[in-house]
Image (cartoon, rainbow, N blue to C red):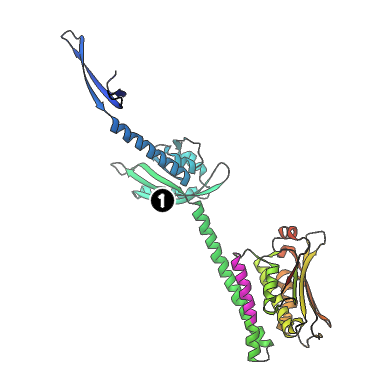
Amino acid sequence: MPQGQEAILERKDGTRIPIAPYPTPLCDETGAIVGVVNMTVDIGERKRAERALAERSLQLALAGKAALVGSFAYDVDSDVMQVEEGYAALHDLPDGTRSTTRSEWKARVHRKDLARVETVRSHAFSNGRSEYGFEYRIVRATGEVRWIESRSFVSYNGDGRPQRVVGVSIDVTERKLAEEHLRMMVAELDHRVKNVLATVSALTSRTQDASGSVADFVTALDGRIQSMAATHQLLSSQQWKGILLSDLARRELAPYATRDNTEIGGPDITLKAEAAQAVSMVLHELATNAAKHGALSIPDGRVAIRWHRLQSGDADDRLCVEWQETGGPAVRAPGRCGYGMEVIRGLLPYELDGEVALTFAAEGVHCRFALPLSELAGGDRLAEALGEPSTDGQG
């Protein structure tokens, strides 16, 4: 058996152990082999260590593939890169890839990032830095863009020239998406806060102009701000993705609703944030007026809110919402147009390109407004959702 070749030795008790024999021939004075001296080494511990190391390497490789974390190494004067499985998975290279080239890597780097990352590398080399890092994007063969965070360690030769780079790459796409989402949310929050403050300022000024006394001013302003806050809460609970028109109508009528004095009817329609805020302000003014002077001011009065689609056969299809009061005291048109009437008649045309018709009929106030579907929740998606009305009696 050749020296050092591994073999299995079976003992008298039947157990087997791995061994490595080291035979040495014995020769006579003529050079003829007359015998052999052999040393046998038990390599069981070494084999167990090798198996443990192989299992550990496999675990690390699997973890790297799952987490999209991988290492790489290359000689600065060579184009060849040694990579392991995690790196290959991260860069969408074929399974089993153990080497690639920097040229291929450059081809995958996003064109807007390549010059920057090469500049970082060059500066690190010229300054003799032992470590450098950067974030960049790669474009996979499928067109998918992924964000990579790379950290590299550099070794230099005796005259200070960079010799070898060893590094690790991590897929940080989810983190970058989360950061971008947070940035957009902060910007959106800033925008909404400014709009809310501007609206509150306008509400305060116009409510004061229309109020006959301090008490009237406080009551009217408080009601309007509370309505805004409730709409904000509904939107916030839905992550500002929009709220159902039925929920909006039900919430505005809730302070005055009894078992059978309100009715809400229409298909499920989700209004986007801007549309919901405008519609809620109009419904609040209608409900407040009905509670003070109209159908909701007496026990036998009734208010119905219904909506349906007005079909025109083209992109100008509209949602028609009708407010109808019945059973209340005889209606008389107001002598002057207060702030509440201005909101009802002017807000929706201004904010949503809507049309509003407000009638003070003797049998009850009637308000009808038509809003473009495109201004409510993305046009086509909303139009598809509009079907036959379903009645929701509220008490």
The mark tally for this picture is 1
Predominant secondary structure in magenta? helix
* Residue at the far front in the pictured view: 13
Would you say residue 75 is visible in this rendering? no
Q: Is residue 182 magenta?
A: no
Along the line of sight, which residue is nearer the eye, 323 or 132? 323
**Residue 158 vertical placement versus 47 (above, below):** below
Q: Amino acid at mark 1?
A: Gly
Q: Which residue is mark 1?
A: 133
* Residue at the far top in the pictured view: 30
**Residue 311 vertical placement versus 148 (above, below):** below
Left/right placement of residue 301 relative to residue 48 reads right
The residue that appears at 61% across and 73% down in the rendered structure is: 195
Place residue 332 in its image quadrant: bottom right
Q: Quadrant of the N terminus?
A: top left
Along the line of sight, which residue is nearer the eye, 134 or 231? 231
In the rendering, at what x and y percent does residue 183 appear? 53, 62
The residue that appears at 73% across and 80% down in the rendered structure is: 342
Q: Quadrant of the C terminus?
A: bottom right
Asked which secondary structure carries label 1, the reply is: strand
Place residue 223 in its image quadrant: bottom right
**Residue 343 vertical placement versus 85 (above, below):** below
Please report the bounds of the magenta region as a residue range. 223-238
In the rendering, at what x and y percent does residue 249 appear? 70, 72
